[in-house]
Image (cartoon, coloured by chain):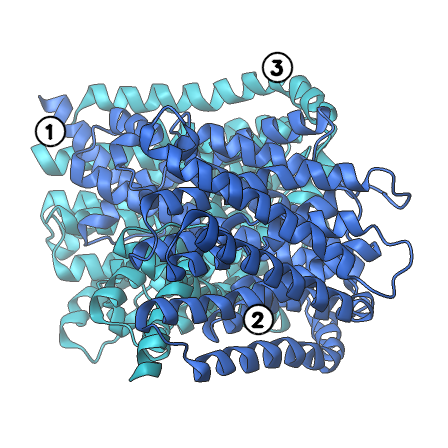
Chain colours: A blue, B cyan
């Protein structure tokens, strides 16, 4: 009894201590600090094991490592081992193996479990977002603004075709073949337009193709696609809500997006020199890295605030800093940060993908699977054709460009999520969209590698830094 | 009206999108995802600006940069600008300038504000904890196990004297001079025993003195002091709770702590080779960094779970990996990660330090300030004497060793926090402990630099990596 008391006292004491610097805790929540940290540490350990095992296995099978990281995420996530769980998947704390383990270790009550699970998931989600921000910053640093503007028109055409083709094919097909009402069909069509810039650019980087003409067209098109996606989302959302399209809002988005991207490039020309001057003047550790990283965070924040995506800001920041003579040095310092943050993003995407919608043994999945087959066909065809929209580039690998636009990734899921939240999508159509997103995401990396395999310029950037 | 509707719709949509990969959100909390990210981005921007401005200014004034980072934190924190606020300081969301800014940008209701403030603070606190974990991992990598064992006895003696002297002086002084009852006096005495390994080791590293005999004695003593501190905390806590000391618990802590530290060193000898073998076999990015980082996280988790501090585990992991031939390469890759994570820790410590207890204009502070003066004297004298406990080391800088043990940092605050939570400490005594902690923390870096300034071996490690 005495021992129990002392230990429970000690627990509280140590929780506080370990929640340092969350000290002088007066709120009860702060008492869980040590357990939140323990949960985050365990989750990160799971993330790194999954990403390394998956990535290495994928590499041995001659597939892009990022595919293995996604699959590793699926295995530790909601679809299999239940180690990495998130409240968004309407999982409870007790569904998470990590949380059950902590409960066993710490004798936690259910209130503590709920709080710790929430906090830990929130931290991992934000780390994943910081991961994709750093990824796009790195991609920006590795991209060449001059190259990118050189293929700007082609990228824009690829993006526009890649939005129009699947949208029209999908919407019309759903209405005529499956007798889906117009508004849900438009929603599903919109979900088909997305391109996951994160997954595509990571594969290109892994294959050493980021700087090839194809790579730059794909990245450029994916960036433009992201902007178009945000505009389409606004249109579709207001259509679903009011049955009307709010033109003013659309104009606002187009103007702010173009203004942001152009503005950051122009600002870049000015900021370049002052950036180098600032970095040269600093004498303490991180003299180059901290100003650069802060700049990326500022741009990500600005993009976020004007209703673009944070990752677009980080990409623009990378592009701007790529123009300085500190590029190489910076690249080398950002690499280890990307190494530890980026896997959190990919494993989390995999962990959150609920593959149970793919199970045909469950009767209610079947209607969705039929529609899904159609959506997948449209999703692939509608993007593959974009390669043939490229003009004025002799001998360019059109197939690779088209394939590079296939993965829908997280952006596609957003449409499904909003559609469901607004009540526009019924269960089968929602499931079909999710299946389409998962499949295009997982199928694109190996396809892209295959389509690029005969290309000469592959100098894998995969080698670890010395 | 229509525009407002569409924009609020769009807000929800974009919040979801930007909370990617927190997708398919069904819980209302997930809708705040984008704002949590925005809050975290803004907080990090504030952290980096404060740490760089403070650190650089400190450097120009010929003071250790970490002092500037702490002061930078104070300026942006609860004591001045209210940019970086934490619920632990019983701050509300509306007290935070960042949160007010987000509220203005996003038209957030008070429920959203509370949730976003909580989540954002939780994320920053965990990032700060990861920061001090990475710091101790780096310090471990930079420390030499052989050197450390060579000065092991001296470090142990310094630690024991540095615990005993201030404890006895403080407790006896409080009882006899200030007529404080025994139990609160014991609590305050216990708070005097702590040493902040983070602050001391960072200053040593900045001054290029980490590997000197003095540096290794201080780091070794600070590690042992941390373990002793945890044991003292257990004793004092059970004393306060039951009026009795639970010997079994004390024995458990001593055994587990020694077992952990010895075990990790022995494990290290075995793990060394397999670690290099694993790192050599991996072919994907982060081949060296990810296994090393995962190892550090595992050790931090284990230390946390057996009721030691997570940072002790990370330090042990660093020590172990320091023995491999990958040391240099690893060191270089951990550096940028430390550069971006460690400032979050120091700025957060500063931001959470509430200097209002120092204001003598407030009547209720005065009693505390008188006791504080006594505690500060004991805190400094009780640690400075430890240098003269070192034996068998000719020409060692005894003053520097003593001064290196002065900063109480976050560990000292834990005692104050637990004392207050358990009702043992009255307001003036609690305030006095906080003042003592703040002052010793801020005074130690410049004193340490001064005491080491005539020493030859200073080869500042402060230069940015190229």
Q: Answer few, some or many: residues within 10 Å of disc 1's Cα (few below 14, many 20 plus, some between 14 and 19).
A: some
Question: Observer-nearest residue: B3 or B197?
Answer: B3
Q: Which mark is nearer the camera, 3 or 1?
A: 3
Which quadrant is the C terminus of chain B positioned in?
bottom right
Please give the label number shown on residue B244: 1
List the residue tagged with mark 3.
Answer: B270
Residue B52 lies, in percent from the top left, at 57, 68
Label 2 in the same subunit as label 3: no
* SS at badge 2: helix
10 Å neighbourhood of mark 2: few (<14), some, or many (≥20)?
many
Is B177 located above or below residue B281 in the figure? below
Q: Residue at x 23, y 60 (%)?
A: B432
Q: Reading the chain from its start, which is encountered first: label 3 or label 1?
A: 1
- Residue B159 shows up from this direction: no
The disc placed on residue A299 is 2
**Residue B365 visible in the snapshot:** yes
Q: Report the chain holding disc 2.
A: A
Q: Are marks 2 and 1 in contact (CB under 8 Å)?
A: no
Is B179 rendered above or below residue A439?
below
Q: Quadrant of residue A159?
A: bottom right
Q: Mark 1, chain letter?
A: B
Q: Position of residue A443 (x, y in %)?
A: 62, 37
Label 3 lies in what chain?
B
Above or below — where is A48 with respect to B463?
Answer: above
Q: Residues within 10 Å of mark 3 (few under 14, many from 20)?
A: few
Q: CA distance from mark 3 to mark 1?
A: 42 Å
- State the residue at coordinates (28%, 72%): B108
């Amino acid at each position: 009894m005495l021992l129990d008391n002392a230990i429970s006292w000690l627990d509280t004491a140590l929780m506080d201590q370990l929640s340092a610097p969350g000290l002088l805790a007066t709120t009860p929540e702060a008492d869980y600090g040590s357990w939140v940290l323990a949960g985050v540490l365990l989750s990160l350990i799971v993330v790194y094991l999954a990403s390394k095992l998956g990535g290495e296995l994928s590499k041995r099978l001659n597939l892009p490592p990022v595919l293995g990281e996604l699959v590793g995420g699926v295995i530790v996530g909601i679809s299999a081992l239940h180690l990495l769980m998130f409240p968004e998947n309407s999982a409870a704390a007790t569904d998470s193996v990590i949380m059950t383990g902590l409960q066993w270790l710490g004798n936690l009550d259910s209130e503590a479990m709920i709080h710790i699970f929430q906090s830990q998931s929130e931290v991992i989600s934000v780390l994943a977002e910081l991961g994709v921000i750093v990824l796009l910053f790195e991609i920006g640093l590795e991209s060449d603004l001059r190259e990118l503007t050189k293929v700007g028109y082609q990228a824009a055409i690829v993006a526009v075709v890649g939005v129009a083709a699947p949208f029209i094919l999908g919407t019309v097909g759903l209405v005529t073949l499956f007798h889906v009402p117009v508004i849900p069909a438009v929603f599903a069509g919109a979900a088909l337009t997305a391109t996951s810039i994160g997954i595509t650019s990571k594969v290109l980087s892994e294959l050493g193709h980021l700087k090839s003409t194809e790579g730059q067209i794909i990245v450029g098109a994916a960036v433009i696609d992201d902007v178009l996606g945000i505009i389409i989302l606004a249109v579709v959302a207001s259509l679903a809500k009011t049955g009307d399209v709010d033109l003013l809002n659309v104009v606002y988005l187009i103007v702010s997006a173009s203004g942001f991207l152009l503005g950051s490039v122009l600002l870049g020309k000015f900021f370049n020199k002052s950036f180098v001057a600032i970095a040269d003047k600093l004498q303490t550790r991180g003299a180059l890295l901290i100003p650069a990283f802060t700049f990326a965070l500022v741009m990500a924040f600005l993009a976020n605030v004007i209703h673009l995506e944070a990752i677009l800001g980080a990409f623009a920041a990378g592009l701007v800093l790529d123009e300085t003579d500190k590029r190489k040095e910076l690249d080398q310092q950002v690499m280890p940060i990307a190494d530890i943050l980026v896997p959190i993003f990919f494993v989390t995407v995999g962990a959150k993908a609920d593959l149970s919608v793919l199970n045909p043994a469950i009767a209610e999945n079947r209607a969705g699977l039929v529609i899904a087959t159609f959506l997948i066909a449209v999703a692939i065809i509608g993007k593959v054709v974009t390669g043939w929209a490229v003009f004025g580039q002799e001998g360019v690998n059109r197939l690779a460009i088209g394939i590079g636009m296939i993965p829908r990734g997280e952006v596609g899921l957003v449409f499904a999520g909003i559609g469901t939240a607004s009540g526009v999508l019924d269960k089968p159509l929602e499931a079909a969209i999710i299946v389409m997103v998962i499949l295009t995401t997982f199928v694109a990396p190996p396809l892209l590698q295959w389509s690029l395999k005969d290309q000469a310029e592959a100098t894998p950037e995969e080698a670890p830094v010395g």
